[in-house]
C-alpha cells in the first residue's frame, strides 16, 4: 500500500455493519476510518499521518449501493466513483455521474468513494459542488445506533462537524428529473485536479436554477443572487428558452460573485486583480455560461 516504511498500525478492524464500524471508532478514538484509501495513503506516504489504528469500511455492504426513498436517492457512502459513473447511475443523477467520471485516472475512480470525497473535503473534490447544487443531506451514523441528518453544505463550511465516533453513512439527494451539468477546467489535458468546476441543475418544479462553483475556495460557493436572477429570465413554459445575452451575463454574474473585485482603498482607488486571478474569473464565467447553456438545451 505504500513505498515508504511508516510505523505499522497497532490494530486493523474490519466491521461488516455501519454500527460495528461506529463502535470500533468509539472504542479507539484515535482510529482512522478507511474506505478507498486514496487520500489516507497519500497522507501516509508523505509522512503527514501515522494512524495508530484503522477501521476498514470495505466490507460494509449496506453503504455500497443506493435505493429510492420518497422522491430521493439514498446513496451509500461507500459508492465508488467508478460505480457512480456507470450509465444506470447517470440516468439517476447525471451531474454526480459526470463528476465521478472526471474524478481522476481509473485507479482513483475504482477505489475512491463518495463518503471519502465528502469527509476529506478537499477543495478540488469533484463531487462536492454537485452535492452543494443538489442541496444534498448527509445521514450520519453515531454511537448507540443514533442517526442524524446534516446538510452537506454545513459540513463543508464547518458549521457542523462530525463528532467522535461518527461516520457518514448515506447521502440523500433529491431526484429533480431535470437537466444537470458538471464541468471542470484542469491545468492539463486529460484527468486532473480541477482549477475550477461548476455544477448546475435545473429545478422546474420550483422554476429555479442551482449553481455551485468548486475548487476556487475551501468549500463550494453558491452564487444565490445569480441563480435567482437568471431563473426569472427563463421561459419555463416554452421549452425553457433564454436569450443568448443572458447566458453570457449569467457567467459574468457567477464569476464576479465568486471572485469579487478588490475592496476600494481609503483614497477610493481600486487595485486591479492579478492576471492569474483574472484568468481564473474568466474560466469560471465560461464554465457557468456553458453549463447553463447545456442544461437549457
Image: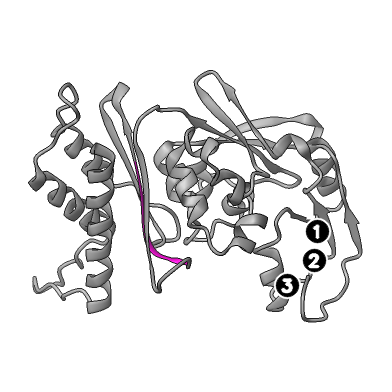
- Viewer-side residue, 2 vs 84: 84
Query: How far apart in space, not on screen, are marks 3 and 1 (Cα)?
Result: 15 Å
- The residue shown at (39%, 27%) is 177
Would residue 160 be seen by someone viewing this image from the given angle? yes
* Dot label at residue 266: none
Q: Compared with residue 223, is residue 122 higher up or lower down, i.e. above or below? A: below
Residue at the extreme bottom = 4
The front one of 52 and 252 is 252
Residue 30's mark?
A: 1
Residue 158 visible in the shown view: no
Rate crowding at label 2 as few (under 14), some (14 to 19) or many (20 or more) other CA atoms within 10 Å: some
| In this picture, residue 64 sits left or right of residue 88 | right
Q: Which mark is residue 44?
A: 3
- In front of the other: label 3 or label 1? 3
The residue that disc 2 covers is 51
Upstream in sequence: badge 3 or badge 2: 3
Sooner in the amino-acid sequence: mark 3 or mark 1: 1
Which quarter of the picture shows residue 178? top left
**Range of residues picked out in magenta:** 193-200
Above or below, 131 against 270 in this view is above
Residue at the (15%, 68%) spot, across then down: 264
Give me the residue at 48% from left, 57% from top: 102
Amino acid at each position: 500500500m505504500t513505498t515508504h516504511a511508516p510505523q505499522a498500525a497497532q490494530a486493523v478492524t474490519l466491521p461488516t455493519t455501519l454500527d460495528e464500524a461506529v463502535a470500533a471508532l468509539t472504542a479507539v478514538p484515535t482510529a482512522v476510518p478507511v474506505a478507498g484509501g486514496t487520500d489516507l495513503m497519500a497522507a501516509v506516504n508523505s509522512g503527514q499521518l501515522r494512524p495508530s489504528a484503522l477501521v476498514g469500511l470495505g466490507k460494509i455492504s449496506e453503504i455500497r449501493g443506493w435505493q429510492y426513498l420518497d422522491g430521493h436517492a439514498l446513496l451509500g457512502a461507500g459508492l465508488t466513483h467508478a460505480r457512480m459513473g456507470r450509465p444506470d447511475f447517470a440516468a439517476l443523477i447525471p451531474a454526480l455521474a459526470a463528476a465521478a467520471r472526471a474524478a481522476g485516472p481509473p485507479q482513483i475512480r475504482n477505489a475512491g468513494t463518495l463518503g471519502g470525497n465528502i469527509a476529506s473535503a478537499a477543495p478540488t473534490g469533484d463531487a462536492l459542488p454537485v452535492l452543494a447544487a443538489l442541496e444534498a443531506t448527509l445521514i450520519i451514523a453515531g454511537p448507540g445506533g443514533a442517526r442524524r441528518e446534516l446538510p452537506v453544505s454545513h459540513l463543508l463550511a464547518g458549521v457542523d462537524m462530525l463528532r467522535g465516533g461518527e461516520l457518514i453513512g448515506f447521502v440523500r439527494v433529491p431526484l429533480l428529473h431535470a437537466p444537470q451539468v458538471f464541468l471542470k477546467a484542469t491545468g492539463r489535458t486529460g484527468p486532473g485536479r480541477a482549477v475550477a468546476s461548476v455544477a448546475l441543475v435545473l429545478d422546474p418544479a420550483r422554476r429555479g436554477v442551482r449553481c455551485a462553483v468548486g475548487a476556487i475556495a475551501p468549500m463550494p460557493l453558491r452564487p444565490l443572487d445569480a441563480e435567482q436572477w437568471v431563473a426569472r429570465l427563463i421561459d419555463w413554459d416554452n421549452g425553457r428558452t433564454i436569450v443568448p445575452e443572458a447566458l453570457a451575463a449569467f457567467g459574468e454574474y457567477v464569476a464576479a460573485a465568486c471572485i469579487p473585485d478588490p475592496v476600494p482603498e481609503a483614497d477610493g482607488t481600486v487595485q486591479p486583480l492579478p492576471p492569474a486571478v483574472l484568468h481564473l474569473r474568466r474560466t469560471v464565467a465560461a464554465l457557468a455560461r456553458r453549463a447553463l447553456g447545456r442544461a437549457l438545451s
